[in-house]
Amino acid sequence: MKTGEMSKGIVRPDGNAVSGFILLNKKPGITSFQALNEVKKVFSTGKVGHTGTLDKFASGLLLVLAGRAVKLAPWCSGCDKEYEGTIRFGTETDTLDPEGVPVAEAPPPDRETLEAVLPRFMGNILQTPPVYSAVHVDGKRAYALARSGTPVEMRERPVTIHALELLAFDSPLARIRVRCSKGTYIRSLARDIARAAGSRAHLAALERTAIAGFRLSGAADRPVPSSLRPVTPGAFAALGIPCMEADDAAVSGLRRGQPPAPFLQSGAVRFFPGEEDLSPDCAGVFDKNGALIAVIEKKDGGRWGYGYVYAGA
């Protein structure tokens, strides 16, 4: 079985048995939740989720999971993401986006000053999320506390900026490309870049162009039955998750929840060619036809155990 093979057996378009994922191009002006409502209607299932919210004003790639594939969210949501955004210098808003109320003003920087501060935000940095965000504070969403008038103290947290590029600058607008880790807020990045340059700003526009190896260019503008994709080794490869292949006896045992370690030791479950030297913390296990059987991960002591058994007996 090759990494790019498709498995027709995982996509079952019969009501609640639907299972797979959709690459969806969310349009600005609707929430991620509203985008999922359309998916639910098309596939007649309430089991739908995504692997990272996009703000209402933002557009771009949503990785939507449907049916049993929703259970794969923990292994999909930690991926790096790529964005293109437009920073508007001069005014900072309370939400750090165009829908907010102005709270501070300062002259825009010149290009030289802007380019000089960008390297400060490369690599591992500490970032304070926006007050208007879904981050939990004392058990409640920060945005809910802020809207109720409750003072909210947001704590810094580590994020990683893998790439930060200035694509264009026509004062007061700067267009940037960012590749970053899970949990990074581009609104916060715009705020912090502006302050470092002696200015203030908000994020005027944002488009998510990639989630791990999935690109916006491959996304559907609206969900249709043909946009549902099966969970294949190729999908796992796009997420950067190694894959294993199990023989028929191992598949039967794994579906019954038997410990995976003996199958690995016997060679009944083995890495795909080219991945034998990897030492991952998790892996997808597929049968010889490319159907996902389980996600296994290393537990305490380094022994392989189950993250999720995907296919029932």
Image: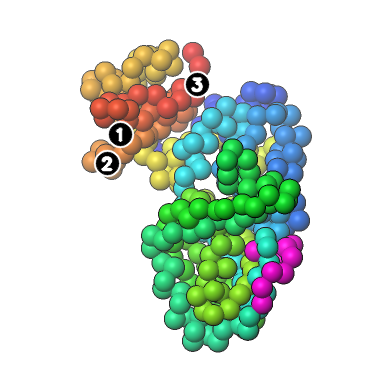
Q: Colour scheme in the image?
A: rainbow
Which residues, given as a range, are shown in magenta?
A: 96-105
Q: Is residue 131 above or below residue 44?
A: below
Q: Which residue is nearer to you in this view: 182 or 99?
A: 99
Helix, strand, or loop for circle 1? strand
Q: Which residue is nearer to you in this view: 65 or 107?
A: 107
Mark before the other along the chain sequence, 2 or 1: 1
Q: Which mark is residue 311?
A: 3
* Camera sees residue 180: no
Tell me the kind of residue under disc 1. Phe
Q: CA distance from mark 2 to mark 3?
A: 25 Å
Q: Position of residue 166 (x, y in %)?
A: 51, 75
Point out the frontmost of discs 2 and 1: 2
Q: Is residue 293 above or below residue 88?
A: above
The residue depicted at 32 percent of the width and 28 percent of the height is: 299
Q: Which mark is residue 278?
A: 2
The residue depicted at 46 percent of the width and 28 percent of the height is: 292
- Check if mark 2's residue and mark 1's residue have beta carbons within 8 Å: yes
Tell me the kind of residue under disc 3. Ala
